[in-house]
Amino acid sequence: MTKPSTRAGFVALIGEPNAGKSTLLNRMVGAKVSIVTHKVQTTRARIRGVAMEGDAQIVFVDTPGLFRPRRRLDRAMVAAAWGGAADADIVVLMVEAHRGITDGVQAILDSLQDRAEGQTIALAINKIDRVQSEVLLGLSKDLNDRFDFAETFMISAEKGYGADDLKAWLAAQLPESPWLYPEDQIADLPLRMIAAEITREKLTLRLHQELPYQLTVETEKWEDRKDGSVRIDQLIYVMRDGHKGIVLGNKGETIKAVGKAAREELEEFLDRKVHLFTQVKVRPGWLEEKERYSEMGLDFRDGNA
């Protein structure tokens, strides 16, 4: 008997910030590999999550949200997003059902007309539980009138509605190919970067509006210990002395709470005991330092105006 052929390929999730790309990625992969917060622009690097569907291996690229960039970091993030889409076998545009066709969505549609020649582009209307069915049908028609999508899916990434149908369709569209990663691998990000992302997520959730994007986290040291545990040392870079005080909190309570939440999630993710040590450093110019971009998986040169 001939061995059934396998399929493999890359799927890029694109859309505006907060469209639900990270939530969908995590659901498809079945593990948390991408940062999820209620803040926009939280995904900085193209995070690859690997999902299995029958004989197909789907490598998801969770791109930064597409928006109008102002700073170097913004420009590098947008370049990374379009780079991820260009490299993919299939692109899925995610649009929030309740927000409809915003100026940002229209800008992405316009860019797709120029960039997507020859690519398979699907539409996923997300957060369908927030609107009535007639609104959904009208939005779907309007979007398909503006762009020739290969397929349209109505989903809720958070609740799971429609996600299995989307996953099955993606698997069927991928080219025949050997698998690109070992079957049990769920992400191609280094564990050091995943650990930094988890801590950054906890900081973002805890600090809300106080420090939106002016901090970054790097894993400085990773030490596997003989008892099976791991020691992780991380640096949190902030722009100003005042920001350091916010991250530390009164009597260090904020950083303690963040560290505890990050450590617990890391232990669950790694399935081993974690000793997490964090240090906050003031670095006024980190947004202009090449090394910081490399740590985030971004290209410093993409931030040029």
Image (cartoon, helix red, strand yellow):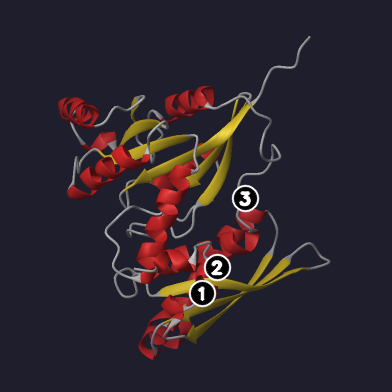
Q: Which mark is residue 188?
A: 3
Front one among 86 and 181: 86
The amino acid type of the residue labelled 3 equals: Asp
Residue 186, position as x, y percentages in the image = 62, 44
Query: Which residue corresponds to the image point at 30% horizontal and 63% vertical from the top-left?
Result: 69
Where disc 2 sits, the SS reads helix
Question: At x 36% / y 88%, what residue is drawn?
Answer: 242
Does label 3 or label 1 sit earlier along the sequence?
3
Disc 2 from disc 1: Cα separation = 7 Å
Evaluate whether residue 205 shows in this view: no
Residue placed furthest toward the right = 226
Q: Where is 90 relative to 64, above or below?
A: above
Task: Give, as a three-letter code, the residue at label 2.
Answer: Ser
Q: In this view, does 38 lie above or below 140?
A: below
Spot occupied by residue 295 in the image (x, y as percentages of width and height): 56, 68
Q: Distance between the residues labelled 2 and 3?
A: 16 Å
